[in-house]
Image (cartoon, coloured by chain):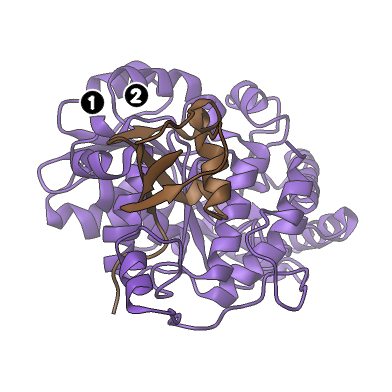
Chain colours: A brown, B purple
Amino acid sequence: MQITVNGEISKLEEIEVNLLKLLELKQVESPEMVAVQLNGSFIEMSSYSSTYLKSGDDIEFLFFMGGGSE
Amino acid sequence: MTGFATSSIHGVHLKADVHGSLRTPVYDTVAFEFESARDISQAFAGRKPAHTYSRITNPTVEDFEQRIRLISGGSAVVAVSSGMAAITNVILTLAGAGTNIVTSKHLFGNTLSLLEKTLKPWGLEVRYVDMSEPAVVRRAIDENTRAVFLESITNPQLEVADFKAISKITSEESVPLIVDGTVTTPYLFCSREFGVNIEVLSSTKYISGGATSMGGVIIDNGNFDWRKSPRLNDWADKMGPLALLGALRREVYRNVGSCLAPHHAYLHSLGLETMSLRIEKSCSNAHDLAGFLQQHQRISSVNYPGLTKSKFHEIATAQFAKRYGGILTFDLESREACFALLDNLHLIKRATNVNDNKTLILHPASTIFCEYPDEVLNDIGVRQTMIRLSAGIEDLEDLRNDLEKGLAAL
């Protein structure tokens, strides 16, 4: 399956991948520090495990750790 | 889901330490290096999870924030430099000139001063109501109301509002409910279960435990739709359910510069590990001292939600798991008698803090409320004859003996 994560093409070998699994695959260590958009819509954290991806999906991870400084 | 103490001690595993340290080290550093220009630009854009600058995030502070998130059940936490910084950051994020917040006059003295003397000149309207009358709260809310704010147990009046009744109103009116839970902490009061949307705490108190360092936390309980908060509309479009955290982290908190020092975060994480034990002892001491004082002939009245005669006993019992906090107040016949008692004590310390390991005593009218004239003090329930005692975790008999001797010398 081919998806786009933060603007970059990503090929996944797994057949069934939900958002929780994607966060794990992308080594996001603090899922609670990220807002997730799937094809332009925000997904509630409680729905990560029930939201399965399909080829062509566009995912944005928005983290709260960086964000402009000196 | 593990228990409260276990969660406090083990926290959230963020990253394996290179030396296998069981405790997250103190990252006393300002900046963090990146492997490439692209990496740092991605971090600034929020597309890569990385610390960039310690005024915004820091690994030791993050460890503390994640522990608080775990024990509170909230969806997001921002740690700040003090409890006052927590209140200020939240109000600056939600409200502004031409808007109002609804609160009670029965507030910590510096909170009242923040609202009256610091924020009012910037155009914020503050509407004071009696929080024990939910219908009055509803009438005070209008289209310009940006939040309802109150304390879990007011300091020093020790009043307890019915949070389910108030949160029902704020939910129906689409206004976020903010509670200062400093004196209860998530151990005594699970604010999310009572419909509170944001909890702020001074972590200087019960969390640090030994009064080692200043700090505060802001907890987003994740139960408010931020699209309904006008100042957060744009942030809700950008950050969805984490709009409050985004507005804080990328605007107000970042720009105000109210970051928690990494060393203080370390001390607060350490304090958190024993907090549940200390709160049990502090509440037990406060309860027993209140019982002792109300039997004493020199005391005209004792105020403590744990006493069955308190008008807030029933609601406090329902909301705080049958503990009533570590603070009590009592009255003597005059201000002079209050001063004399304070001067007659040897173990109990004359100091302005609460929920320390040490038992502390204070005359509120002449200290934390000294900037207010008598008519204001009367209005906010702070009497010249009132003494506030914050029970620590010493042996009860030693505290009783100190008070007994102090009162006998009057």
Rendered view: B93 above or below A1? below
Q: Residues within 10 Å of mark 1 (few under 14, many from 20)?
A: many
* Relative depth, front residue between B410 and B6: B6
Indicate the amino acid at tag 2: Thr
* Image-based side of B164 in relation to B255, left or right: right
Indicate the amino acid at tag 1: Ile
Which label is found at residue B141?
A: 1
* Relative depth, front residue between B103 and B227: B227
Say which residue appears at 70% left-offset and 31% top-offset.
B307
Using the rendered view, name the quadrant where residue B80 is placed: bottom left
Say which residue appears at 70% left-offset and 25% top-offset.
B308
* Relative depth, front residue between B34 and B276: B34
Which label is found at residue B198?
A: none
> Tags 2 and 1 in contact by the CB under 8 Å rule?
yes
Task: Check if mark 2 and mark 1 are on a common chain.
Answer: yes
Label 2: element kind:
helix
x, y (%) of residue B322? 73, 30
Using the rendered view, name the quadrant where residue B95 is placed: top left
Q: Distance of mark 2 from mark 1, alpha carbons?
A: 9 Å
Mark 2 sits on what residue? Answer: B170
